[in-house]
Image (spheres, coloured by chain):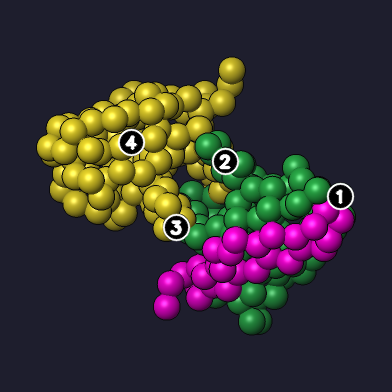
Chain colours: A green, B yellow
Amino acid sequence: QKEVEQDPGPLSVPEGAIVSLNCTYSNSAFQYFMWYRQYSRKGPELLMYTYSSGNKEDGRFTAQVDKSSKYISLFIRDSQPSDSATYLCAPSLSGNTPLVFGKGTRLSVIA
Amino acid sequence: GAGVSQSPSNKVTEKGKDVELRCDPISGHTALYWYRQSLGQGLEFLIYFQGNSAPDKSGLPSDRFSAERTGGSVSTLTIQRTQQEDSAVYLCASSLGLSKNTGELFFGEGSRLTVL
């Protein structure tokens, strides 16, 4: 089993839709759970992160972690064409270990 | 700018040639990472430098790949005798490298390597 599994998509939704992106992971020692967003031909950049289990909301984005089932979710409300990008989940053990990335889900939001 | 800088942004080479890719991390970041991103394969970890410690080379795919980091700052990734399967985007990232931090990585825009 790979450390992080993520459906690569592509996922295409109409503008305004609610988007749900998900990952599963195998290492129960992961403590930080990050979501990176990568626009075409750019490097990934951190969108948001959560520590341990629970929810975190930032504007239209909500990150959710369920450590009991090793399941990570990112929800995007009122999706916009500018949200079209690849979203990568990346759990982390600590601040000085390499991140393990999911394959990324390519999202297209159609106006 | 104060971000991670990578060069060249694009490199086309012939099979069998050696290539060098350069990364200039954010000033003050002690940790530096190289990842490779191939189509449909996600980000593959290659190598990690943390301060003066021995690098974590566990992700290097073969002995044709090597990297060094001089003076705790600039890093060079070298691929010898390139093969077509080496074609990918090579991404460099840096971070504060503190164990109590989240481990957020700041990425450069990548070096796109095409091996003909």
Q: Are marks 4 and 2 in contact (CB under 8 Å)?
A: no
**Residue at 23% in and 31% down:** B13
SS of the residue under disc 3: loop
Residue underneath mark 1: A59
Residue underneath mark 4: B113
Seen in the picture, residue A61 relative to B91 is either above or below; the reply is below
Q: Is residue A17 left or right of residue A88?
A: right
SS of the residue under disc 1: loop
Residue underneath mark 2: A40
The residue lying toward the viewer, choosing from B1 and A16, is A16
Disc on the earlier residue, 4 or 3: 3
The residue lying toward the viewer, choosing from B74 and A103, is A103
Q: Are marks 2 and 3 in contact (CB under 8 Å)?
A: no
Residue B21 image position (x, y, % from top left): 32, 29
| Residue type (three-letter) at the residue carrying disc 4 | Leu
Output the chain of dot 2. A
**Mark 4 packing: few (<14 Cα in 10 Å), some, or many (20+)?**
many
Q: Kindly identify which numbered label has been placed on residue B38.
A: none
Residue A52 image position (x, y, % from top left): 68, 66
Disc on the earlier residue, 1 or 2: 2
| Residue type (three-letter) at the residue carrying disc 1 | Gly
Seen in the picture, residue B88 relative to A49 is either above or below; the reply is above
Q: Residue furthest bottom?
A: A69
**Residue at 49% in and 54% down:** A99
Quadrant of the image for the C terminus of chain B?
Answer: top left
**Residue at 83% in and 53% down:** A15
Do marks 1 and 4 share a subunit? no
